[in-house]
Amino acid sequence: MPTLKFSLQTKLFAAFFLLSAIITMAISYTLFLHMRTNHLDTLKRDLIVTANMAVMHVAGEAQLELIGQVPEETADSRLRHLLQSIGKNSQDIARVFLLRRLENELVVRSEWDARNETGRQTGTIHYDQSVTFWDTNRSVVTENGENGTVTVYAPVRANARTVAWLALEVDAAAVANDTRHFAERVFLVAFGAVAVVGVCSWFLARNFAARIQRLDLAIDQIAAGKHDIHLRVEGSDEVSLLAARINGLATALHGERESLMMATIESLVTALEAKDAYTYGHSSQVANIAEAIGRELGFAEDELLTLRIAALLHDIGKIGIPDHILNKPGRLDAEEWAIIKQHPETGAKIIAGIPALKAVAESVRHHHARWDGEGYPAALSREAIPLGARIIAVADTYQAMVSDRPYRAGMPEEVALKEIRRCAGTQFDPQVVGAFVKSTYGLS
């Protein structure tokens, strides 16, 4: 069965989002409970105020009816009308009723019910286990968890005694309706918060995954031998500390690599100098000229270093040439010249075997290639010739012309410069020649 594979960014997003969503929902639920509790408390307070005002109205309008000084039929009609007027003043009130005490029970004296205006009959026993308040002078609020009603009982007093209790009841529908409104508002807030959390989680996950990917890429580059890297250190968290350590490792490896490479170059040049004393002075001067041309062409520092190394080693293949040919005072014959022409290929093979110098091997191999394709060893032409090789070709030729050889004296610099210009477009890359002319060596 195939295993699903998720990217680090996906995993981080899922973790951030789920955690944040759970926290958001928990806070939202707590907020909902708090709002619902506050609403119920407010509802109870409002009911008490309404009940107290209604008691004052009933006591003032129906005091005689309450103390039994009016015929019962007339009193019932009068009380029912009062209760109806009280109930219809508020759309949230579902029932208004008066209770009186009969022996040890509470019975209905009169009632108005919004769902059934006749209400309960007079004398009906009122069942409410929480009602144990007959002798108190304060309003009492009760909640019925079974049917969801909230009821306030307010004492009606006459002649300094409690003669009845006025009850206002809000039914479950009204409470549920308010609760639903609260739930809708909290849901909208929670949904918006979760959406914001999702977006923030995505950006956090993408940023964190990108930082990890940069570390991974840097490690791959170091493993491949590319040590001139620098990771951006953002903050002081663990990822930033790891990036700083990778930077330190790359710097250390880069320094060790350069030290090893320069030691290798010195060893090769020393070996060549021991075979041909002319070559070392020639190679170092060619390297200086090539570096000046590279700067004119806008080379970066690491590119200039590679170019300088290639120029120093461009004649390293002469190590394989017999001494009697390499140091012959006169002109070379055709057979000897054929052997001399092998030195670029020989030098490239020597350098290619050194991992730190592989980048300069092609420049060494083709430094005798011509722009018109008539050079050697591979007869490359134009842009097919590596740029480093084209630069070394100009620097090598100019230095050879102005230096003394066993069989001739060096040319004046003005004559050599004129010859370089004449060969632009045939032997040399015109752009490289232009850069050479603008460089210090060309101007001098």
Image (tube, grey):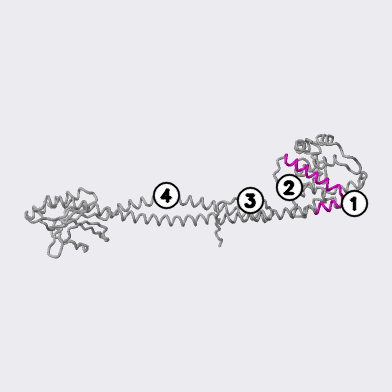
Q: Earlier in the sequence, mark 4 or mark 1?
A: 4
Q: Is the C-beta separation of discs 3 and 4 under 8 Å? A: no
Cα distance, mark 4 to mark 1?
Answer: 85 Å
Q: Amino acid at mark 4?
A: Gly
Q: Identify the image quadrant of residue 250.
A: bottom right
Residue at x-position 32% and y-position 55%: 36
Query: Mark 3 highlights which residue?
Result: 230
* Element at label 4: helix
Left/right placement of residue 28 relative to residue 424 reads left
The residue tagged 2 is 305
The residue shown at (11%, 52%) is 62
Tell me the distance, in whole angstroms, between the alpha carbons under discs 2 and 3: 18 Å
In the image, is residue 423 above or below residue 346? above
Which region is colored magenta?
267-296
Q: Residue furthest bottom?
A: 104
Disc 3 crowd rating (10 Å Cα; few below 14, some 14-19, many 20+) is some
Q: Quadrant of the N terminus?
A: bottom right
Q: Is residue 213 above or below residue 408?
A: below
Dot 2 or dot 3: first in sequence order is 3
Q: Position of residue 441 (x, y in %)?
A: 78, 38
Q: State the residue position of label 4.
A: 192
Badge 1 or badge 3: first in the primary sequence: 3
Amino acid tagged 3: His
Among numbered discs 2 and 1, the one appearing first in the sequence: 2
Tell which tag, 4 or 1, sits nearer the viewer.
Answer: 1
Question: Which of the 4 image quarters holds residue 375?
Answer: top right
Q: In 3D space, how far apart are the residues under numbered discs 1 and 3 (Cα atoms)?
A: 47 Å
Q: CA distance from mark 2 to mark 4?
A: 57 Å
Q: Mark 4 Cα within 10 Å, few/some/many (few <14, many 20+)?
A: few
Answer left or right for 372 relative to 41: right
Residue that carries the numbered disc 1 in the rendered image: 323
